[in-house]
Image (cartoon, rainbow, N blue to C red):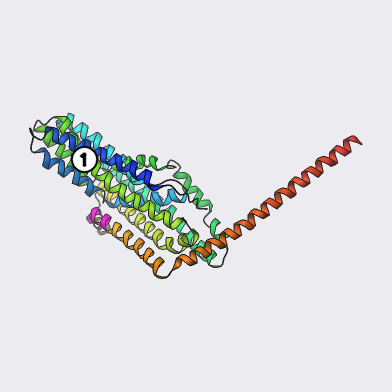
């Protein structure tokens, strides 16, 4: 499978998604300060909602999904600068919708929320798990292709390096993710992830909204809670997505960097996707069926926020190590040599194609001329 690396300018997207996050932040805090003089307790609850969003962005599901979707879309030649924002925004829509229901129907929410959590928790967590397993499988196939490219490029065979992942199984898995062709479509994935409603932060935002509403605080003011939650989560997920997008773009920008550094990075992505996906499935099935074996207990005891933070640290360490190695061992010179050799080979192929085209045109003209002479005779 040929990587269709395309360069997309970062600054316009940085301004665009940064303005979206700032807009949410200003609206949320604006609603708080309008009513703060009459309801001083708003400040603490609003701050909690904002920090809940910051915290929830470190959920390992977020980190893993954003990383793997970025990895896939960059490999398809798509702009991935907005993957983090759109995933987070789709995820937040669930919280916003439920918060509105909570605000307007506090008593109804108190009775029905546990039921929704039971059903939505199982379905949403299962979806998250299977989606991550699917992404992990796709990236595992990409990893095998990169390994083949590594061996091919070491021997100077660039044609094999480019085509090494073009397999039937890859195309089959890729068709299953055809709904995700652009980064804005990740909103759908984020929304479905949010249906899990199995994290304390999401429940806490609804509980905070319910408490505030029961105290008689106007719904406009209470609505600031889910908006601030969204702004906090979108801020962190957008930063994560931009970091992943920039880092992967750096790797994909030349064949040398791709094959030598992407092995470790893609391996980390695959490991994270499979691990988190399996844990999600075990938690959903084990909780629903009331299983209590050691494996289920271990899966249910894992703190996803801590795992998410550790995963971010691992990615930063890996990318930092790649940059240090690149500088210390002066690999830029070798990279330039590889790119030059590849360009030379491409030029040869282009000349061969032009020669074949000219030969075909000449043959066709001869056939036409012969036919005309035959008809005149």
- Asked if residue 34 is among those painted magenta in the image, a careful observer would answer no
Q: Nearer the viewer, residue 88 or 245?
A: 245
Front residue of this view, candidates 80 and 185: 80
Residue density around tag 1, few if under 14, some if 14–19, many if 20 or more, within 10 Å: many
Q: Is residue 310 above or below residue 290?
A: below
Q: Residue at x 42, y 45 (%)?
A: 79
What residue span does the magenta drawing correspond to? Answer: 297-309
> Where residue 44 sits: x, y (%)?
11, 42
Q: Is residue 336 visible?
A: yes
Task: Name the element at disc 1.
Answer: helix
Q: Main secondary structure of the magenta part?
A: helix
Number of marks: 1
The location of residue 217, given as percent across then percent down, is 11, 31
Determine which quarter of the picture holds residue 225.
top left
Percent x, y of residue 271: 36, 59
Of all residues shown, which one is farthest toward the bottom? 329
* Residue 162 placement: quadrant: bottom right
Q: Residue 257 appears in which quarter of the rendering?
A: bottom left
Please report the residue visible at 22 percent of the width from the left and 56 percent of the height from the top. Answer: 301
Residue 239's place in the image compared with 260, above or below, is above
Q: Is residue 17 left or right of residue 301?
A: right
- Which residue is identified by label 1? 228
Q: Position of residue 110 (x, y in %)?
A: 15, 35
């Amino acid at each position: 499978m040929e990587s269709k690396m395309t360069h997309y300018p970062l600054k316009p997207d940085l301004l665009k998604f940064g303005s979206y996050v700032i807009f949410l932040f200003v609206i949320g805090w604006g609603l708080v300060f309008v009513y703060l003089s009459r309801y001083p307790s708003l400040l603490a609850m609003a701050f909690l909602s904002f920090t809940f969003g910051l915290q929830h962005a470190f959920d390992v599901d977020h980190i893993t999904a954003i990383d793997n979707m970025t990895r896939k879309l960059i490999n398809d030649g798509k702009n991935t600068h907005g993957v983090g924002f759109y995933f987070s925004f789709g995820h937040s829509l669930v919280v916003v919708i439920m918060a509105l229901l909570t605000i307007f129907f506090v008593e109804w929410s108190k009775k029905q929320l546990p039921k929704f959590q039971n059903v939505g928790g199982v379905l949403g967590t299962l979806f998250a798990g299977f989606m991550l397993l699917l992404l992990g499988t796709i990236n595992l196939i990409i990893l095998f292709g990169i390994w083949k490219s590594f061996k091919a490029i070491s021997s100077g065979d660039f044609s094999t390096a480019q085509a090494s992942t073009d397999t039937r199984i890859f195309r089959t898995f890729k068709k299953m993710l055809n709904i995700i062709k652009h980064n804005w479509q990740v909103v759908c994935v984020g929304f479905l992830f949010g249906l899990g409603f199995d994290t304390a932060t999401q429940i806490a935002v609804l509980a905070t909204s319910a408490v505030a509403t029961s105290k008689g605080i106007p719904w406009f003011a209470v609505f600031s809670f889910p908006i601030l939650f969204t702004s906090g989560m979108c801020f962190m997920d957008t930063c994560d997505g931009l970091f992943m997008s920039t880092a992967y773009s750096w790797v994909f920008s030349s064949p040398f960097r791709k094959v030598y550094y992407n092995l470790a990075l893609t391996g980390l992505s695959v490991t994270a996707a499979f691990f988190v996906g399996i844990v999600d499935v075990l938690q959903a099935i084990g909780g629903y069926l009331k299983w209590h074996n050691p494996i289920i207990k271990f899966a249910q005891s894992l703190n996803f926020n801590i795992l998410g933070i550790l995963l971010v640290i691992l990615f930063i360490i890996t990318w930092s190590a790649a940059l240090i190695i690149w500088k210390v061992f002066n690999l830029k010179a070798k990279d330039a040599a590889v790119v030059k050799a590849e360009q030379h080979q491409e030029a040869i192929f282009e000349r061969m194609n032009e020669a074949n085209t000219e030969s075909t045109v000449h043959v066709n003209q001869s056939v036409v001329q012969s036919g005309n002479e035959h008809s005149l005779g």
